[in-house]
Image: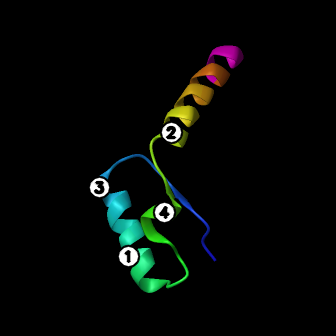
Amino acid sequence: QILSVTGDNASNNTTLTEALAEALPEFQGDFARTRCYLHILNIVVTLNLLSILN
């Protein structure tokens, strides 16, 4: 079971969610896709952790 797909705004992620929606009827396609926000949050957290560790 797939609840959500998280990724940046690249077109290949759109293609992936469209293919999953066709292959898995219970998958809600673009509604179940979390765009850019989490990608940016990941970058911010990673940079902060690196600055703490270095």
Tell me which label, 4 or 3, sits earlier in the chain. Answer: 3
Of tags 4 and 1, the one toward the viewer is 4
Residue type at mark 4: give it.
Phe
Residue 31, above or below 1? above
Dot 2 and dot 1 residues touching (CB under 8 Å): no
Whole-percent x and y of residue 48?
Answer: 63, 20
Q: Which labelled disc corresponds to residue 35?
A: none
Q: What residue is disc 3 on? A: 11
Say which amino acid is labelled 2: Tyr
Residue 19: give its label. 1
**Residue at position x 55%, y 81% in the image:** 26
Residue 49 % position (x, y): 67, 23
Q: CA distance from mark 3 to mark 2?
A: 16 Å
Q: CA distance from mark 2 to mark 4?
A: 15 Å
Q: Tell me where the magenta segment starts and ends, as one range.
A: 50-54
Are the residues at dot 4 and dot 1 in contact (C-beta closer than 8 Å)?
no
Could you give the CA–CA distance between mark 1 and mark 3, rounded to whole angstroms? 12 Å
Report the residue marked by disc 4: 31
